[in-house]
Image (cartoon, rainbow, N blue to C red):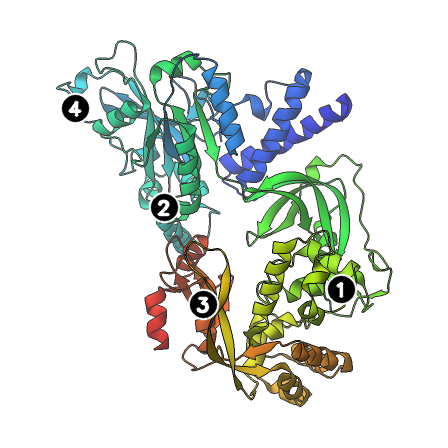
Amino acid sequence: MNKTEAQERIEKLKKWLKKWNYDYFVLSNNDVSEGARDKIKRELEELEKEHTEFITPDSPTQRVGAPLSGKFAKIKHITPKQSLADCFSEKELVEWEERIMRLVPGEELDYITELKIDGLNLSLIYEKGKLFKAVTRGDGEYGEDVTHAVRAMESVPLELNEIRNYRLADYPTLEVGGEVFMSKESFDELNEAEGDIFANPRNAAAGTVRQLDPKVSANRKLEMFFYSLTLPKDSIIPPPTTQKENLELLQKLGLRVNTKFVQHSSLDTILKEMRRWEKDKDSLPYLIDGLVVKVNKIRHQKLMGSTAKSPRYSIAYKFPAEQSTSKILDIEVQVGRTGALTPVAILKPTEVAGSTVSRATLHNEDEIERKDVRIGDTVIIQKAGDVIPEVVEVLKDLRTGNERRFRMPLRCPVCSGAIIRTQGEVVRRCINPNCYAIHQHQLEHFVSRGAFDIDGLGEKVIEQLIQSKLIEDPADIFTLEYSTLLHLDLFKDKKAHNLLDAIEKAKILPLPRFLFALGIRYVGEETADIIANHLELETHNIKIKEKQKRDQMSMFEEEGKAKEIEVAYVKDLADELKYLTLEELKEAEGIGEKVAITLHKWINDENNQKYLQKLDRAGVKLTVEGRVRTDKLKNKSFVITGTLPTLSRDEAKDLIKQHSGKAISAVSKNTDYILAGTSPGSKYEMAKKLDIKIVDEEGLMGMVK
């Protein structure tokens, strides 16, 4: 990037950030996440660091806090307010410690971590022990007078406690800092009563403090935690020597402190504390977005001092952002197992929800058109369901004019075969049955966790098996031999044995998983369960030998005792499926017309019948004990969240399905129950907001008894 391009980019980033700050802090509007905003701000900081000549006093990186709204009187802060510097990784936290240790050579440091409450920063001034003013952070030098709103908050004392026989009349002017917030419960009550007027509790707290009527503040149940105290030099109250003493003094004065602060002697325990809260944050009654790490001793804090914007002795260690921003470097098209062509954005690598993301789905060409996505765009990305990265929005204000439009290919990008777009569908598909990509993805699906679940058959192994012409279809997996595998460069003795053991173990699997593994279009895990419950298969008793450990000191296995199990043969399934008419499939409860037509066409394809016979000859057998036993949960849908006491998530799903219920992944107003364990997460909070019934494992067991 040359100087001209850098200057243009800096101006665009500044303009966008100023607009975001105004929307978020003044209008309490939250269309773009703070995680995405942080990424843009860091990009601006990096560019300004490289091109210092383009730094201006009005840059968002050179200011503290937010612009004033103009509604309230301006109050000058007793001491200028600063913003904490942010870090987002262990590496950045280590680098911060290295910087501050150079400022106090030879000293041993200890730290305090405090929960970073996601709220609104306020400074309160007490004159002779009585509340005098409450001021927002504003631009760091001046804030807004919101005393009328703070006086109505029950968690803020109007008068401090007397300590050490000091009379309130002798108290000097005290300035205390803290965070105003709204609990999740109060936020839900507010939105229910007033109609979803705020996007999140932080916006609700900011919007409430800025209400002119103090009754609004009282009715909306705002709360406040305090964490800083500034004493004048001539104070009769001895100043604290550590941040821990500072927090204890605030408590003695009657100011509410978040008691989940922890003292640390090293970064190792800070990192453990961060991982703990990253996992357990949803169990709190309020929102947090990370930890604040502070050097504990005040003497060390003074030696370290501050930059123009932030104290050096403290840093905000934020949770990984669920949203981030990146630049689209290119758009590629992937071909899936059903031949579907999916456009994928190739991104400049960025951190999202704790992992590095360099690719994100664009879904289909209609979505690209609707969002107006172009190569070269700066975009907001997030993990859909915390798994698959997707492009959420294009930041069009940051365009330079050099962005390029994308067009879907007219032929398959892998095999150059013909593609079609069926009327009523949003995707194009390759219709070449011999397409390499389709072949590869079908095999990957066949061995995936919800299907045959064969450990050791990853993408690279499957690719090599295809290229070596050892497998043409999934049934060939069961004919692989030890001596053949050793000829492949990915395999050595132990790995070959482990794979063959996994393949042998996978030969017996539940009927629904087998149907899902076949990769029939529209037949997902739920539909496979429905189809399985419409089939009546003859079963046979067979004996199998279980592998068991020789002893606790051995890693080797030996044949155990034989046990008898009940199974169905794949050849019988093939016959049963073939006799199903299209009308019968259409009439089956839970199977729609589209699924019925596709399924009937697949069943009656001669090649597919031969494929099933081949799987039968390979020794694949089906268990049917997981079929429906009762209708006790019929037409009831469950979302599982958290860790259950005795059941794994898959076991809980199977139990629900065995009693005619549905186990779904997303919470909506149509969900009947939330099955909740420990550390239930955001789905639990959503369920409470939507007034969905919540049951635990014991409750579920009671429902199916």
Identify the amino acid type marked 2: Leu
Q: Quick check: marks 1 and 4 in contact, CB under 8 Å?
A: no
- For marks 2 and 4, give the CA distance: 32 Å
> To which residue does mark 3 refer?
651
Identify the residue at horizontal 73%, vertical 47% (top origin): 373
Dividing the picture into quadrants, the one containing residue 236 is top left
Q: Quadrant of residue 532?
A: bottom right
Q: Is residue 220 left or right of residue 667?
A: left
Q: CA distance from mark 1 to mark 4?
A: 83 Å
Q: Give me the disc on residue 162.
A: 4
Q: Which numbered disc, 3 or 4, marks the residue that appears first in the sequence?
A: 4
Q: CA distance from mark 3 to mark 4?
A: 59 Å
Q: Nearer the viewer, mark 1 or mark 4?
A: 1
384 sits left or right of 693 in the view: right
Residue farthest left in this picture: 165
Please say if 137 is above or below 573: above
* Residue receiving disc 2: 284
Disc on res. 470 = 1
Q: Could you tell which of marks 2 and 1 lies nearer the N-terminus? A: 2
Amino acid found under the numbered disc labelled 4: Glu
Q: Earlier in the sequence, mark 1 or mark 4?
A: 4
Q: Is residue 91 left or right of residue 686?
A: right
